[in-house]
Amino acid sequence: MNFQVTFATKWADFDPNQHMRHTAYNDYAAEVRVRFFAKNNFTIADFSRLGLGPILFTEETSFRKEVLMGENITVNMKLAGVSKNYERWKIVHEVFNEAGKLAAVIKVYGAWIDMKQRKLAIPPKEIEGLFVNAEKTEDFEEILVR
C-alpha cells in the first residue's frame, strides 16, 4: 500500500531564510505515521487503551532541495525494517516539494513502549497488521533484536 499525505505548509514552518525549518520536516513525518496508523484502524485512542506508544531511538534527516514559503509538500512512508516480533521498526519518509522534487529523506528507527512499565514492549497481535500491508523499501530488512 502506497501511503502519502499532501500538506499545505504554514507560516510557522519557515525560518528567516524563507525556507522550511529543519525540524518542521520531522513534524510532518511524525504526522504521516500517526495518520498511517489511523488509516489502518489503529488510532491514538487505541494506543491509549493498550497503554502502548511508539518511541524513536534515532531520527536522521537528509536535505536535498528547498521547500519555499507557501509551498505544499507531499510526505510518504515506507517500511524499511521490522523485527520478528514487531517490537522494533524502521521507517523511511520522503518529502517532496510542490514541484515534485525530492526535498528530504527522513529515516526513523523506533519501537513500542509499555506506558506503565516505561520499558520496551512486544506489541499485541493487532499491531502486527499495521505493517503487513505497508509499502516496503527496496532494502527492507529483518531487524535482529539481541
Image: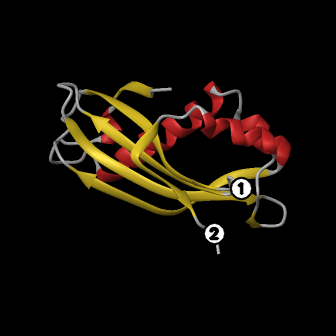
The one nearer the camera, 13 or 27, is 27
Which percent across, then down, holds residue 117?
83, 66
Q: Is residue 126 left or right of residue 130?
A: right
Q: Is residue 11 left or right of residue 107?
A: left
The residue that mark 2 highlights is 145
Residue 55 placement: quadrant? bottom right
Question: For the image shown, how many numbered marks are present on the structure?
Answer: 2
Q: Position of residue 137 (x, y in %)?
A: 41, 43
Residue at point 62% right, 36% down? 132
The residue that appears at 41% across and 47% down in the rendered structure is 92
What scheme was used to colour the molecule? Answer: secondary structure
Task: Using a 10 Å C-alpha cutoff, classify the residue at mark 1 as few (fewer than 14 neighbours), some (14 to 19) or many (20 or more).
Answer: some
Q: Position of residue 58 (x, y in %)?
A: 47, 64
- The x, y position of residue 53, in whole percent, is 70, 51
96, above or below 22, in the image: above
Label 2: state its secondary structure.
Answer: loop
Q: Quadrant of the C terminus?
A: bottom right
Q: CA distance from mark 1 to mark 2?
A: 9 Å
* Mark seen at residue 35: none
> Relative to 141, is 102 above or below?
above
Q: Residue at x 61, y 39 (%)?
A: 131
Q: Amino acid at mark 1?
A: Asn
Contact between marks 1 and 2 (CB within 8 A): the answer is yes
- From the viewer's perspective, tell me whether residue 2 is left or right of residue 124: left
In the image, residue 79 sits, relative to residue 75, either above or below, namely below
Of 96 and 7, nearer the camera is 96
Q: Is residue 92 above or below residue 122?
A: above
Badge 2 local density, few (<14 within 10 Å), some, or many (20+)? few
Residue under circle 1?
85
Which one is earlier in the sequence, the residue at label 1 or at label 2?
1
